[in-house]
Image (cartoon, rainbow, N blue to C red):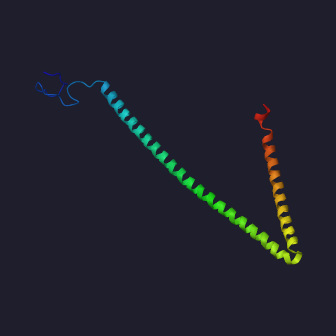
Amino acid sequence: MQDSQPGAPELPEGVAAPEGQGAPPTDDAPVDDALGALREDIAVLIEDARTYAEAEVRFQKTRAEIAGKSAGRALVLLVLALVLLHIALIALAVGAVIALAPLVSVWGAIAIVVGVLLAGVAALVLAARRDGALLAALFAGTPRDSA
């Protein structure tokens, strides 16, 4: 006969007791179940992390692709704007020469327009030089240089 718990019905030989009846439970069973559940949770967590990482990489690639296309388009549009600005400034200079020609002769008009343009260039160069001097002063005394 099998060992049975007090008050439990006796089973014929060869018939196994249902789970939870018969042999007393061991202390290792709840620990094994908890470790198995923990292993499953960790496996699911690892799979979720891998899925998230793959999705993040795909997202960043797509974002970089869109940014590259947008930057390229912006650069082309900026170059076209600068070309049109250049053409407009040439038209302004030619128009100024034509407008001044009856007043001071063609050569006088050309001299006036070129002189004004050169004065503008000189003013821009001086402004750029001041900005360059400011930058040089900002980076002249860095702590790394004095060591």
Frontmost residue, 1 versus 84: 84
State left or right for residue 60 relative to residue 33. Answer: right
Q: What's the residue at 61%, 58% (across, down)?
A: 74
Is 97 left or right of 2, judged from the image as shown?
right
Image point 54% across, 50% down: which residue?
Answer: 64
Q: Position of residue 76 (x, y in %)?
A: 62, 59
Q: Position of residue 42 (x, y in %)?
A: 40, 35
Residue at figure coordinates x 57%, y 57% from the top left:
70
Q: Which of these two is toward me, 130 or 32?
A: 130
Instruction: Determine the residue located farthest toward the bottom in the rendered image.
Output: 102
Q: Residue at x 51, y 48 (%)?
A: 61
Q: Most extreme residue toward the left, as rendered?
A: 12
Asked where in the image residue 77 lies, by quadrant, the reply is: bottom right
Q: What is the number of callouts on the image?
A: 0
Nearest the viewer among 62 and 39 is 62
- Name the side, left or right, on which 89 lies relative to 25: right
x%, y% of residue 86?
72, 64
Give residue 46's quadrant in the image.
top left
Above or below residue 69? Residue 138 is above
- Image x and y of residue 141, in percent: 80, 38
